[in-house]
Image: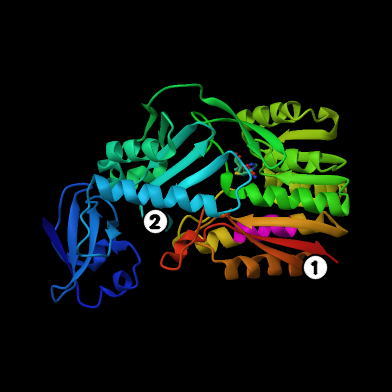
C-alpha cells in the first residue's frame, strides 16, 4: 500500500473529516490515478484512505477515515446501499432522484441520478473512474435495475486528467424519458440534456413556485434561464395567466414547448424567447413591461471562490434589472448555484441589487437544493444551491 505524508499542520481538515487533500498539503508520496493510498500526518499518524489523483489540484479524496476499513468492492456496495436507502427517508415526490451526491454521500466524484428505471452516472474523479465497474455493479444490485448510462462528459473531468466520455455502461434503452415530478410530467433526454439530463436539485423550488402561484394568482410570470421549462409548467399548471420564458439554448426551448403539450397546457399562455437574459431584462425595462413574478435561475457564474468577485457583479446585474421590472407586490425567486458564492454573500448581492433598483422587499423564504442533493456537516461545499424569495413592497 502506498502512503502519502502531509506537511506539518495540514492534517486539520482531515481530522474534521473533510475529504479533500490539496496538492500543496502533501510533503511526499504518490501513486497512480485512482489508486488507494494511506494518508498520514507529518508525524506518521493514520488520517484516511484516499484515492490519489496525480493530475488534480485536489490531489487525493478520502474514501474512509477508519484505519480498519478496507477499500474494496464490499466497501463500495455498502456506501451505495447506505446512500440509496437514505433517499427513502427524504421527502422526494418524483421518479427522478439523485441517488449519489458525491462527497456528501461519502463517494467523492460520483454522481448518480435515477430517472424511472434508468440510472445516469457521472464519474468525475480519478478514484470514481478507477472503481467504475465495481460501482456500476453495486448501483444496479442495490436498485434492482439493469440500465446505466454514463454522462462523464463534464468539463471537470479535464481537471482530473480524464477524457470526456458518454454512453451505455450497462444495458440499453431509450434516452428520451418522461419524468413524473410533483403533479406534472417533464420530458428529458439523458444523452443530450444538461448534467445527467435535468436539474433535479430545483424540484422543490418548482413546487414552491407553484404554491405561490396558486396562493397569489400571478398573471404575468417571467421565467429566466428556463431550460426545458420546469418552472413554466409548474406555474401554468398552478393557474398562472401567462408565462414568458427565456433561454439561450434552442434545443432546451424546443423541449420546453413539448413539455407544455405533455401536460395538456394551452400554448397560447406561453411565450418562448431564444435570447440572452441580461439583454431581455434591459429591453423589458425600456419597453415598460412589468411582471407579477420573476424566476432567476442562472447557470453557475462562480465555480470556485476565485471567480466570486466577477460573478457577484453578474448576479447583481440581473437581480437589479429584475427588481426594476417587478410590479410592486410582485415576487422574485432568485438563485445561485455557484459553489464560490456563499448563502451570506448571495443575500448581500440581492440586497444591494434591490437598493440600486430603489426597491425594498420582504424576504419570505431562503431556499436550497432538494434533499436528495444533501449537504453534510463535514462537507460544507455541498451547499452550492441557494435561493431567496423576495416579495416586493
Ligand atoms: N431553471 C431550470 C434550470 C436552469 S439551468 C430548471 O428548473 O430546469 C440554466 C439555463 O440557463 C440553461 O438552460 C442555459 O441554456 C441557460 N443560459 C445560460 N446563459 C444564458 C444567457 N445568458 N441567457 C439566457 N439563457 C442562458
Which picture quadrant has residue 315? bottom right
- Whether residue 318 appears in magenta in the rendering, the answer is yes
Left or right placement of residue 273 versus residue 60 in this view: right
Left or right placement of residue 390 versus residue 299 in this view: right
Q: Residue furthest left?
A: 1
- Assess disc 2: are there few (<14), some (14-19) or many (≥20) residues with their C-alpha within 10 Å of its C-alpha: many
- Which residue is at a point 85% across and 29% down the rendered structure image? 268
- What element does badge 1 sit on? strand
The colour scheme used here is rainbow
Which is the main secondary structure of the residues drawn in magenta? helix
- What element does badge 2 sit on? helix
Q: Is residue 192 above or below residue 212?
A: above
Left or right placement of residue 361 versus residue 128 in this view: right
The residue under label 2 is: 103
Question: Which of disc 2 and disc 1 is earlier in sequence?
Answer: 2
Q: Is residue 40 above or below residue 89?
A: below
Q: Give the Cα distance between marks 1 and 2.
A: 36 Å
User: Which quarter is ligand 1 in?
Assistant: top right
Q: Which residues are magenta?
A: 313-321
Comparing marks 1 and 2, which lies closer to the viewer?
A: 2
Which quadrant: the N terminus? bottom left
Give percent across and percent down for residue 125.
32, 47
Which picture quadrant has residue 97? top right
- Whether residue 159 appears in magenta in the rendering, the answer is no
The reply to whether dot 1 and dot 2 touch (C-beta < 8 Å) is no
- Which residue is at a point 25% across and 50% down the rendered structure image? 55
The residue under label 1 is: 361
Amino acid at each position: 500500500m502506498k502512503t502519502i505524508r502531509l506537511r506539518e499542520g495540514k492534517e486539520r481538515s482531515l481530522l474534521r473529516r473533510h475529504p479533500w487533500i490539496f496538492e500543496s498539503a502533501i510533503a511526499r508520496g504518490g501513486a497512480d490515478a485512482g489508486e488507494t493510498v494511506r494518508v498520514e500526518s507529518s508525524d506518521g499518524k493514520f488520517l484516511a484512505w484516499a484515492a490519489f489523483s496525480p493530475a488534480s489540484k485536489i490531489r487525493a479524496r478520502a474514501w474512509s477515515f477508519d484505519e480498519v476499513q478496507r477499500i474494496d468492492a464490499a466497501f463500495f456496495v455498502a456506501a451505495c446501499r447506505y446512500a440509496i436507502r437514505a433517499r427513502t427517508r427524504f421527502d422526494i415526490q418524483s421518479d427522478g432522484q439523485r441517488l449519489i451526491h458525491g462527497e456528501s454521500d461519502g463517494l467523492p466524484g460520483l454522481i448518480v441520478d435515477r430517472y424511472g428505471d434508468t440510472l445516469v452516472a457521472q464519474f468525475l474523479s480519478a478514484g470514481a473512474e478507477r472503481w467504475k465497474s465495481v460501482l456500476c455493479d453495486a448501483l444496479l444490485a442495490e436498485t434492482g435495475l439493469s440500465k446505466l448510462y454514463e454522462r462523464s462528459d463534464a468539463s471537470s473531468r479535464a481537471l482530473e486528467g480524464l477524457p470526456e466520455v458518454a454512453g451505455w455502461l450497462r444495458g440499453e434503452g431509450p434516452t428520451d424519458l418522461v419524468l413524473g415530478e410533483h403533479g406534472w410530467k417533464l420530458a428529458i433526454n439523458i444523452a443530450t440534456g444538461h448534467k445527467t439530463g435535468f436539474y433535479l436539485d430545483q424540484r422543490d423550488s418548482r413546487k414552491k413556485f407553484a404554491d405561490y402561484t396558486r396562493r397569489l394568482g400571478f398573471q404575468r410570470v417571467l421565467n429566466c434561464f428556463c431550460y426545458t421549462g420546469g418552472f413554466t409548467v409548474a406555474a401554468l399548471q398552478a393557474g398562472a395567466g401567462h408565462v414568458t420564458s427565456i433561454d439561450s439554448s434552442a434545443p432546451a426551448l424546443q423541449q420546453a414547448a413539448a413539455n407544455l403539450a405533455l401536460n395538456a397546457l394551452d400554448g397560447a399562455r406561453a411565450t418562448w424567447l431564444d435570447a440572452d437574459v441580461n439583454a431581455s431584462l434591459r429591453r423589458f425595462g425600456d419597453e415598460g413591461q412589468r411582471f407579477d413574478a420573476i424566476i432567476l435561475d442562472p447557470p453557475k457564474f462562480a465555480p470556485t471562490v476565485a471567480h466570486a468577485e466577477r460573478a457577484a457583479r453578474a448576479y447583481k446585474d440581473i437581480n437589479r434589472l429584475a427588481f426594476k421590472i417587478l410590479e410592486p407586490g410582485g415576487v422574485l425567486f432568485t438563485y445561485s448555484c455557484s459553489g464560490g458564492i456563499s448563502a451570506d454573500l448571495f443575500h448581500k448581492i440581492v440586497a444591494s441589487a434591490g437598493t440600486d433598483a430603489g426597491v425594498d422587499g420582504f424576504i419570505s423564504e431562503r431556499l436550497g437544493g432538494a434533499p436528495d442533493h444533501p449537504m453534510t456537516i463535514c462537507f460544507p461545499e455541498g451547499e452550492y444551491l441557494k435561493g431567496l424569495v423576495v416579495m416586493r413592497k
